[in-house]
Image (tube, helix red, strand yellow):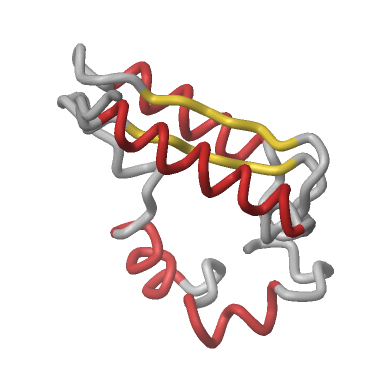
C-alpha cells in the first residue's frame, strides 16, 4: 500500500485509507490481521494462496501463517496451501475449480472432526 507506482494502490486509498497519512495508518493498523496476531489459541485454519496471484504475493500469506503458527499456543493446525498454477481467483478450469472446492470442504470436515 506504500508503493504508489502499483496500478491499484492509489485507487485503494479511497477504500482502505492512505498509510502515508498518520491518522489513516492508525486505523489500518488497528484491523491488520498480521500485526494484530497475539499469543493465544487460534482455530484450525486453511490459508490458501497462488503463485501467479497479481494482487497478493504468495509470500504474504506464507509470512502470515509463519507468524500465526509461532503465536498459536498449541491450538489446532494452520495449513498453508499454495496453488502453483492459479492466479488471484484460484483455479479457472471448471474441474480444477471443483477440485479446489472439494479440497476446502474435505479440510473443513476434517478440522471439525467430521470424517467419513
Asked if residue 24 is positioned above or below residue 78 in the image, the reply reads: below
Indicate the position of residue 42 as horizontal and vertical percent values. Answer: 22, 31
Quarter-of-image position of residue 54: bottom right
Q: Nearer the viewer, residue 58 or 88?
A: 88
Could you tell me which residue is drawn at 53 percent across and 28 percent down?
A: 80
Q: Is residue 26 left or right of residue 2?
A: left
Mark count: 0
Quarter-of-image position of residue 71: top left
Asked if residue 71 is positioned above or below residue 100 in the image, the reply reads: above
Q: Is residue 2 left or right of residue 24?
A: right
Q: Nearer the viewer, residue 19 or 71?
A: 71
Could you tell me which residue is drawn at 60 percent across and 40 percent down?
A: 60
Could you tell me which residue is drawn at 69 percent across and 80 percent down?
A: 10
- Hey, which residue is sitting farthest left in the picture? 40
Asked if residue 57 is positioned above or below residue 82 in the image, the reply reads: below
Could you tell me which residue is drawn at 46 percent across and 29 percent down?
A: 65
Indicate the position of residue 37 as horizontal and vertical percent values. Answer: 30, 37
Q: Is the C terminus in the top left, top right, bottom left or bottom right quadrant?
A: top left
Indicate the position of residue 16 as horizontal and vertical percent values. Answer: 48, 76
Q: Is the N terminus in the top left, top right, bottom left or bottom right quadrant?
A: bottom right
- Hey, which residue is sitting farthest front in the picture? 116
Amino acid at each position: 500500500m506504500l508503493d504508489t507506482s502499483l496500478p491499484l494502490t492509489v485507487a485503494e486509498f479511497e477504500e482502505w485509507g492512505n498509510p502515508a497519512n498518520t491518522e489513516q495508518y492508525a486505523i489500518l493498523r488497528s484491523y491488520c490481521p498480521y500485526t494484530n496476531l497475539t499469543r493465544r489459541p487460534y482455530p484450525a485454519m486453511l490459508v490458501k494462496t497462488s503463485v501467479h496471484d497479481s494482487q497478493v504475493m504468495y509470500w504474504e500469506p506464507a509470512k502470515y501463517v509463519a507468524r500465526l503458527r509461532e503465536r498459536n499456543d498449541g491450538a489446532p493446525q494452520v495449513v498453508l496451501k499454495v496453488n502453483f498454477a492459479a492466479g488471484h481467483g484460484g483455479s479457472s478450469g471448471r474441474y480444477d475449480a471443483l477440485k479446489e472446492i472439494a479440497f476446502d470442504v474435505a479440510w473443513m470436515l476434517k478440522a471439525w472432526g467430521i470424517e467419513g
